[in-house]
Structure formats: C-alpha cells, structure tokens
Amino acid sequence: MMSTTPTQPHALHSHIQAAEVALAADVWPNQEAIYHTVFERVLNAFIRHKVGEEHFLSVTGYGHDDLGRETCDAVFADALQAEAAMVRLQMVSGTHALAIGLNGCLRPGQTMLSITGRPYDTLEEVIGLRGNSPHSLAAKGIHYTEISIFEPGSSAETDAQANGRVSVRETFTPEESEAIGQADLVFIQRSRGYSQRPSLTIAQLKALIGEVKRINPAITVMVDNCYGEFTEAQEPPSVGADLIAGSLIKNPGGGIVPTGGYVAGRQDLVDACADYMTCPGVGSEGGYTFNLTRVMLQGLYLAPGVVKEALKGMALAAKLFEDAGYETTPHWQDTRSDIIQILTLRDPEKQVKFCQILQSLSPINSHITPIPAKPPGYQDEVVMAGGTFIDGSTLELSADGPLRPPYAVYLQGGLTYAHTRLAMAHILGTLGKAESN
C-alpha cells in the first residue's frame, strides 16, 4: 500500500528548521507571554468560583437549579472578561450563537449596522440578505446597512486586497458617522471570514468601539468573537464591547467540547439572549447540560494552551509559504488576533490538492478524499479538509475555502504544533513553489 506520509527531502527539512529559528527569535516569545497571561486569568476564574466535583453533575428534565450550569456560566464570563455569560450545548454553531445575540439585542424597527463590511457567509440568511426565511431579521422589520473600515473601502474580495496588506481605518467619514448615529446596534466581525482583510486586534477594537460610542453613546456594540478567543491578552468586553458570541468547537472549547456556543457581555443583554433562546420566564435558568459540564469546564481550562499551539503552527505555515513565494495573510511576523491563516494559491487545482493532502494526514477519516460541494448556508462551492475528532471543529487542524478567485485556503487550528509542522512539510513538498507571475 502506498504511504500517505512520504519522507520529505532533506532540503525542505532544513528549511523548516531555519524557519523555526526565525520564529523563535521574533514571534513565538510574544505568543508564549500571551498564553501565560490568559492562562492565569482562566485559572483564577476557576478558583474564584470554587469549582468542585459537585459542579460536574447535571440536573435532568427542566434543568432547574443546575449549580454546575450556573457556575460554568460564571467561570466563562470571568475568562472572557464579561459581566455575564450563557454557555449552552444547545447552540449548534457559532452562527446560531450570533443569531441568538442579534435577535436578543434587536427589536422590530431598529437598525443593525455592520462596520466590517459584509458578514461571514452563514449570517447572510440570518440577516435576510439572502433567501426568504420568515424568521430572518429583515422579515421581522429589522433594518440592515453596512460600511467597511478596511482599505480599499469595498467589502468585496478583490485582487487589490489579495496582493497587499489591507489597512484598517479607525475613524469615520461624516456619512458613516451619520449611519452610526442612526443605528441601534453596531456589528463587528473580529475574524476575517472568507475575505482577504485582516482580523481585528484588541487595540483596533478598542479604538473603533471608543469612536463608535463617542458618536452614539446609546448604541450597542456586538462583536463576532469566533476564532479570536485567547489569541490576545484581552477579550473584547474589556475594551467596550457590549456583547460577544462564539462557538465551543472553536477556541474556548479547548478541542474537547463536542458542541455548543456562548454569548457573553452585559448582564441585561445576556438575559435578553436567554429569553430569546428559551422563552421569557425561563431564560438562563433552564436547560439540561447532558452531564457535560465537566467537559465544558475542562475544555476552557485547556483552551489557552491549545490556542497557543495553533498560533505557533499558523505562524510557521505563513513563514514557509511566504518563503516559497505565496501570498499570505497575515504575514508570519504580524500580530495575530485569530487562529486563521490565509494561503493564497491562485490555482483551483492547488486549492483542492492542499485540502486533500491535509485530510490524508488527519487522525480521523484520513482515507476520505475531500471534493468541492456547497454546504448549507454557503453561496459557493467549498472544499474542506476536516479530519477532526469533533465534526466541524476549527480549533483542530483543518482547512477550507470557497472555489472562487483568488483560490485561497483558510488554514486554521492545530491542537498540537507537531501536527501542523508535519502537515505543512508534506503539503509544500507536493505543491512546490508558487509560479511566478
């Protein structure tokens, strides 16, 4: 039988070692420092709330008086630097958590303004930009508008964006300021989604939120925190975000939580989200936790270390592919605020081959060959490599990308640095250097 893990040429092995020397001198020490800061905060949250074995037990039926669920919410809130949190296995995805957040914060006749351009593909039907669901925000009479803080101003993916660094504006034009003044909720997507723009750092979020609230002090600021948790020393609520939402099969689940999501932020907004998710009168006080409270808490405890491993691997991937002549976002030396690395291949065959090789080097379903398909909620065909222990987990090493120019793969996660290192060696050894333009 042909081996799926052929030995790589010595020259490539030496190149990886040289890249690691550069990373150890310039990038990894800062990532290590962030890890220690975040881990201390997470550990202190466990200590503050006196987590014990009694919190690992679930209450069946209605789930009333579930001490473990209540403590889990409190520990997550502290870890995310928020006033309150609702962490639920019943949230089926990050998109579901975001939809709960938006519906909890907005009322008919109000306006949602996205300042980071068009949101991630799966939110388009939630908002009502695509499809005709009677349950979209638009169908409920909630208005939507968008601007982009990225240069060039268009939120669309273009070659101009792919070929260079995309700058972030932290001020607004008079027209944009007027839109902020008329909006009820400003939505900020921290991560890049399927675009070439950068993820937003905590420093950028602080400046943006400060300017938004200067223009409109009464506005609610909601941040899509997916892929960003624990990548920096602070979380968005510490710099003015009123509500954040994310998925437990991404960063905060530590790679072991099997499903779920969270919303966190101001107590009144979290309460409103709980009323929407369950019903008024029940809110956050009901819901069975399926005897998985221990796993949720243990996943949170592990999360800072696993995120650090992922960030180390993404920096290596960027360094190796840049050295081979490919365009990357972020660059290997850039500050990282999510666990995603864009590798622009400009060739649909290379895009598919990248995912197929990664799948063959995955611990689960290595024998399956990914082919492009259109998943629910997406507009384009997407090729995905996801040989993960938890289906769809993007904290585990995985890659995907829509089959459209510039034919980029969105590499993400990595529970261990060793896995990312090995996979990048085999992939780059097969794809070779970028073709010169």
Image (tube, rainbow, N blue to C red):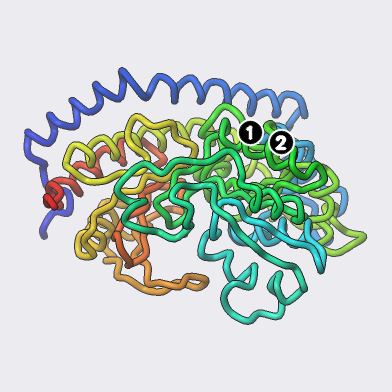
Q: Secondary structure at mark 2?
A: loop
Residue type highlighted by circle 2: Gly
Residue that protrudes farthest toward the front in the picture: 174
Please give the name of the residue rendered at 31% of the width and 41% of the height, measured from the top-left corner: 420
Instruction: Say whether marks 2 and 1 touch (CB < 8 Å).
Output: yes
Please give the name of the residue rendered at 79% of the width and 49% of the height, measured from the top-left corner: 270
Return the x and y of residue 20 as percentages of the image width and height: 25, 26
Res 369 label: none
Res 240 label: 2
Residue 25, placed above or below residue 336: above
Return the x and y of residue 368 as percentages of the image width and height: 29, 65
In the picture provided, is 93 more to the left or to the right than 28? right
Quadrant in the picture for residue 419: top left
Return the x and y of residue 223 as percentages of the image width and height: 64, 47
Task: For marks 2 and 1, give the CA distance.
Answer: 7 Å
Return the x and y of residue 175 as percentages of the image width and height: 65, 53
In the picture provided, is 385 more to the left or to the right than 15? right
Residue 322, placed above or below residue 139: above
Crowding at label 2, few (<14), some or many (≥20) Cα neighbours within 10 Å? some
Quadrant in the picture for residue 144: bottom right
The reply to whether residue 92 is in sight is: yes
Crowding at label 1, few (<14), some or many (≥20) Cα neighbours within 10 Å? some
Residue type highlighted by circle 1: Lys
Residue under label 1:
206
Residue that protrudes farthest toward the right in the picture: 281
Please give the name of the residue rendered at 36% of the width and 24% of the height, measured from the top-left corner: 27
Please give the name of the residue rendered at 19% of the width and 27% of the height, measured from the top-left corner: 17
